[in-house]
Image: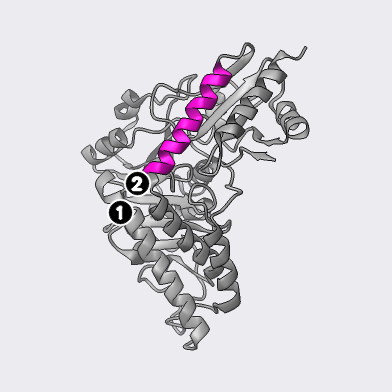
Amino acid sequence: MIYLDNAATTLQKPPQVIAAVVRAMETLGNAARGAHGSSLGAAREIYGARVKLARLFGCGDPSRVIFTQNATGALNIALFGAFSPGDHVISTDLEHNSVLRPLYALEEERGVEVSFLPADRQGRLDYDALPRLLRPNTRAVVTTHCSNLTGNLVDLTRMEAFARAHGLRLFVDASQTAGSQTIDMEAMGIDVLCFTGHKGMLGPQGTGCLLLGPDVELKPFQRGGSGVHSFDRHQPQAYPTRLEAGTLNSHGIAGLSAAVDFLEETGLAAIAAHEAALTRRFYEAVAAIPGVTVYGDFEGPHGAIVSLNIRDYDSAAVADALSETYGIATRAGGHCAPRMHQALGTEARGAVRFSFSWYTTEAEVDAAARAVAELAAED
């Protein structure tokens, strides 16, 4: 199988990630739930992972690295913990449902107002519209770093400048860029960063993170066991326990910690360059094929994603043909990005997404381009 569905999850993981998960399952107990060796070992593993992730993403305080089960969990904690009735939030048409659905729920359940920065037919945001969306009660800009459909990167420098000029928080969903693009919260003015561990981070599924800036305060999203202050009726207020109710996934966190080691040893610049070269190679090959429509803006910065349609074929039929005939794994349909499909005009049939990782080869990209050409040539 040629696996080109890395925007959904990376299939191939570094060997040390697998080894770390196995070792953790054999040795780690429940952190903060005992003073014996296996419990203390879990606590050390988790703390070590916090330190590594804080360093990797420019978060000054490891206690503000909050572990979650995925990016969706991180975003729900962040959004429900930050906004109150009467607040206004600016988001974008590029967002995944992990941002959209919490925001819609906040609209319906709390009276939080939400506006969306529009995108054009190439998925490019209209940054000039930002001032028109601003209101006296605007509290934050909530944006993805990279569209999971087109691969277009958001200009975070421009978003940060707008947010700072108007005293707003900047929330960033880095699910498609964490592990493959350099992100420094302090240098880039990011107040809240959310990402998942199983995509570009090359870690296990069931892992994710919420990283907070130094003066960001969130209300607890859920409450429960913490291993400390057992007789207190309320969730402990100190971070990270404030936002980490219940047993943590220490086995997955051990794997994520090992993944950070791999990323740092390999170098994010090398990973970004490799993925960019593959993306450009595939894009140039398929964009020249008659009957193929490619979505997104490839003139500007881009993630490791190329989405397309072939003639008037349904995207699911194309993805099935790629899988059954050529052994190529892609993702078709709506990609949990309804506003982006509406902007592109592809809501009726979706699109076929090809996405690459550090482990993708040029030979695999070339084979996928040949398959697209053969499908486009069929009657």
Residue, x 60% and y 73% (percent of image)?
25
Magenta segment range? Answer: 269-287
Q: In which quarter of the image is residue 308?
A: top right
Callout 2: few (<14), some (14-19), or many (20+) C-alpha neighbours within 10 Å? many
Q: Do the residues labelled 1 and 2 touch (CB within 8 Å)?
A: yes
Label 1, on which residue? 58
Of the 4 image quadrants, the one containing the N terminus is top right
- Element marked by disc 1: loop
- Magenta-span inclusion, residue 285: yes
What's the residue type where badge 1 is placed?
Gly
- Measured in 3D between alpha carbons, the distance from the residue under mark 1 to the one under mark 2, in whole angstroms, is 7 Å
In magenta segment, residue 200? no
Instruction: Identify the residue at the far front of this view.
Output: 363
Q: Mark 1 or 2 closer to N-term?
A: 1
Query: Does residue 152 appear to the left or right of 26 in the view shown?
Result: left
Q: Report which residue position mark 2 lands on.
A: 183
The figure's colour scheme reads one colour
Q: Tell me if 172 is positioned left or right of 378 in this view.
A: left
Q: Residue 298: image x %, image y %?
A: 44, 23
Q: Judge by depth and name the residue closer to the eye, 9 or 87.
A: 9
Up-down: is 239 above or below 282? below
Of residues 226 and 284, the one drawn nearer to the viewer in this rendering: 284
**Mark 2 is on which residue type?**
Ile
